[in-house]
Image (tube, helix red, strand yellow):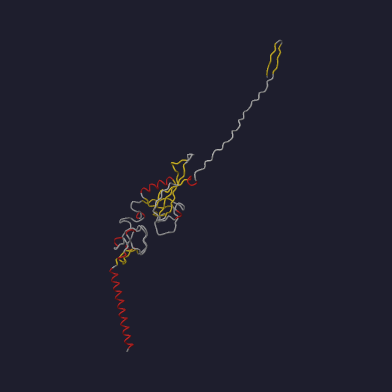
Amino acid sequence: MKNTRGLVMLGIALVLAVAAVIAAASWIKSRASGNTTQVAVAMVDISLGSRITPEMIRMVDWPSGAMPPGAFTQAKLIDTRVTRATIQRGEPIMETKLAPPGTQGGLSAVVANGKRAMTVRVNDVVGVAGFALPGNFVDILVNTQEDTTKTANNREISISKIVLERILVLAIAQDPNRDDTKPKVVNAVTLELTPEQTEKLDVARSVGTLSLVLRNQIDPDPVNTDGATKNALLGAPVVRPAVARAARPVIRKATLVRPREQVDLIKGLDRSTQQF
């Protein structure tokens, strides 16, 4: 009798536990469904400069309290938009990674408002051994002949100077992909500059040779240098005092005067003297 009563109580406890679990799950689901929002995410990896199509995105439930800034809740709002940054699969599509509406695809979609894209020729040394990748920042160094400074022999002095700082690399060769961190040696690098910087860069590459200097991505501080010259690198040339030399004796040529011979000539009563 006692065993039967214990089994009945145990059964009732199990039923109540299962009912409590079901009720809690239903309550949590209802609460969750009421605090989620549909957000557009990428179904595939979308490369920089690509035009978004409906096949590339899908709508997923996202907690309303953790909405990414600039996320889209309607797929039609991003149809035919162009990306200005690479979007990974499963990543929410945000306004900051898209070009303005109406922008055509390609590298032009990546160029910021008010900026210009300009390409310079490089090699394995000028291009920092291929480490100047899209998304990195570089300084531009020019080596040229200084026009205003002359040496004692009227020869121009070679000078190296940083003329542009913190310039964004948009693409290397024809590749604008910013996700690859492997160095690539190319023969051309495309940079993002202001109109004034494009003018300076055009003058710099016409008067000397250019070099790219890779800089820290989180270092925004500018520097102001006077440039480096050969004299500044090696120090001022040493002027040696002139050594006085003894005067050389003046040698004069002496003319030897030979004595002249004398002969007496007698003709009758006349006598004369001839010299030879």
Q: Is residue 112 above or below residue 150?
A: below
The image quarter in which residue 108 lies = bottom left
Q: In the rendering, at what x and y percent does residue 89 appear?
A: 36, 64
* Rendered-image quadrant of the C terminus: top right
Classify residue 61 as left or right of residue 231.
left
Using the image as rendered, state which of residue 65 and residue 46 is in the foreground. 65
Q: In the rendering, at what x and y percent does residue 177 appear?
A: 39, 58
* Rendered-image quadrant of the N terminus: bottom left
Determine the residue located farthest toward the top in the rendered image: 269
The image quarter in which residue 69 lies = bottom left
Report the number of numbered marks. Answer: 0
The image quarter in which residue 96 lies = bottom left
Q: In the rendering, at what x and y percent does residue 19 appear?
A: 30, 78
Q: Is residue 99 above or below residue 272?
A: below
Q: In the rendering, at what x and y percent does residue 95 appear?
A: 32, 59
Using the image as rendered, state which of residue 227 and residue 211 is in the foreground. 227
Using the image as rendered, state which of residue 82 and residue 272 is in the foreground. 272
